Image (cartoon, rainbow, N blue to C red):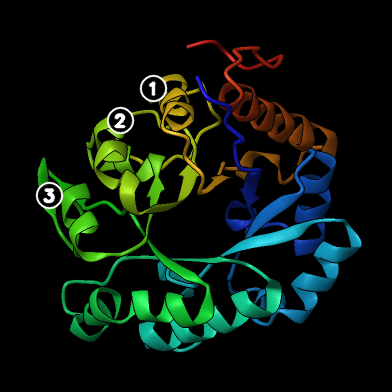
Amino acid sequence: MASYNPPNVQCSTGPFWAFELERAMDALVESGFTEIELMVTRDTKTHEPDIPMKLAEERGLRIASLHGPFLVITKSVWGMDPIGKIERGIEMCTALGADTLVVHPPFLWERSYAAWITEISEESYASTGVKVAVETMYPKWVAGRKLRGYRWLKPAELAAEAPHVAVDTSHLSVSREDLLNAYEILAPRLAHIHLSDNAGDGKDGHLELGRGVLPLERFLGELRRTKYAGAISLELSVSSYVQRPQDQLVEMLTRNRIYVEERLKGRSRMPKGLPRK
């Protein structure tokens, strides 16, 4: 196989919503990360580029990607207009030197937002150098019935509409989509991956790698085989570590980072404490 230089493994600050931003960045640099994905949350420190940039530079971290405030709990951050959020996110990416803005797909009633993605986002990328990557999302399941809120829930639908996409492995599991099939469909437009495991219980658990049912060994092998060059960002639940010593959080993040790096290099060394699948 020809040589493959895998991308640096990032880690998202999104799951660190209960941590001070400084503590989150401390844990990430202690875990060996050099690049991170910053999520814009209700924490005002994440609303402008100056503070995150200063904190990252002090720790030798690069903010390589940004997740816009598209969660339910952040729906009012940067205003209610999704296009306004995107425009502000692109400006912040430019200030931070980040090349990707991750957003959620439009809701069914958000026609102007959908039109911006399909008709304008590629032109925006050409002029700004920032990819607006639309993330795979999932429906709500009620008594076995699928209730749609978002557009483009199927991988083929998303690939047909969005010039740049972001795969969230846990979201695909909740959607009951096959991870490897989804990757094959989305690969030509794939700019960003949120990597975590999932229990297969219909919940968006963002489990540690190897703690769920997803075929992550095969998935990472496929990224290597196809020479995937986009971003890979660990997005792991850290809620159980809020009241625990920092070294336990660092140990967990470190072994998951090594898990990914080893497999992207074609190795299968198993970090201590991570079950083999």
Residue 80 visible? The answer is no
Q: Which mark is residue 235?
A: none
Crowd rating for badge 3 (residues with CA inside 10 Å; few <14, some 14–19, many 20+)? few
Residue 17 drawn at (x, y percent): 62, 59
Numbered circles on residues, count: 3
| Closer-to-camera residue (151/77) | 151
Q: Do the residues labelled 1 and 2 touch (CB within 8 Å)?
A: yes
Spatial CA distance of label 3 from label 2 is: 22 Å
**What type is the residue that disc 1 sits on?**
Pro
**What type is the residue that disc 2 sits on?**
Leu
Q: Is residue 88 above or below residue 174?
A: below
Say left or right for 180 vs 237.
left
Residue shown at the point (41%, 32%) measured from the top left: 226
Q: In this view, does 172 lie above or below 79?
A: above
Q: In which quarter of the image is residue 275?
A: top right
Q: Is mark 1 on a helix, strand or loop?
A: loop
Say left or right for 186 vs 232.
left
Residue at which label 3 appears: 146
Residue at which label 1 appears: 215
> Which one is in front in this view, the residue at disc 1 or the one at disc 2?
2
Say left or right for 85 vs 39.
left
Say left or right for 235 vs 108.
right
Q: In which quarter of the image is residue 75?
A: bottom left
Residue 186 drawn at (x, y percent): 29, 47
Residue at which label 2 appears: 180
Spatial CA distance of label 1 from label 3 is: 24 Å
